[in-house]
Image (cartoon, rainbow, N blue to C red):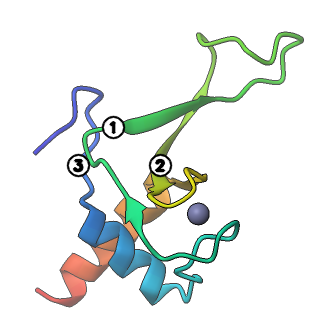
Amino acid sequence: MKHPLGLHYISQEDVQRFLSARNCKPNCPVCDVNDWSVDSHMIGIIPVSSAVNPLSLHGPSLAVMHMICINCGFVRSHAWQLIANWLEEEGKANG
Ligand SMILES: [Zn+2]
């Protein structure tokens, strides 16, 4: 299934398998609890710009998956493309 932006949806399970495969620490760096919410329908867009106005929303951007700590609300972000690439390679490896 495709997102309106043309990106593939990435599920919470996909994100967790990716993080585990990359040896990422599962617990929240703020409260040390491992309880995250990932909404696969909510792809974050972080504007990136070398222009004077860093808040410009019309320039280049970076798609990210947001993970929200259920315990303390800390938000972490992982580059969507990196996870999507990993899923594609994993899909090929597993047939
Ligand atoms: Zn937390």
Q: Is residue 27 above or below residue 82?
A: below
Quadrant for residue 13, please give it: bottom left
Residue 42 x, y percent position in the rendering? 33, 37
Counting residues from the start of the chain, the first of labels 1 and 3 encountered is: 3
Circles 2 and 1, Cβ within 8 Å, touching? The answer is yes
Q: Earlier in the sequence, mark 2 or mark 1?
A: 1
**As shown in the figure, which amino acid type bears the numbered disc 3?**
Tyr
Q: Residue at x 47, y 49 (%)?
A: 66
Which quarter of the rendered image does ligand 1 occupy?
bottom right
Residue at left offset 89%, top offset 11% = 52
Q: How many marks?
A: 3
Farthest residue to the right: give it: 52
Q: Quadrant of the N terminus?
A: top left
Query: The C terminus lies in which quarter of the figure?
Result: bottom left
Quick one: label 3 or label 2, which is nearer the N terminus? Answer: 3
Find disc 3 in the rendering and name its residue.
9
**Residue 66 numbered tag:** 2
Who's the residue at 23% across and 47% down the image? 8
Q: CA distance from mark 3 to mark 2?
A: 13 Å
How busy is the neighbourhood of tag 3: few (under 14 within 10 Å), some, or many (20 plus)?
some
User: Is the residue indicated by label 1 positioned so its CB lies within 8 Å of ligand 1?
Assistant: no
Give the number of the mark in front: 3 or 2: 2
Quarter where residue 10 is shown: bottom left
Q: Secondary structure at mark 2?
A: strand
Residue beneath label 1, please? 42
Q: Circle 1 sits in a helix, a strand or a loop, which is it?
A: loop
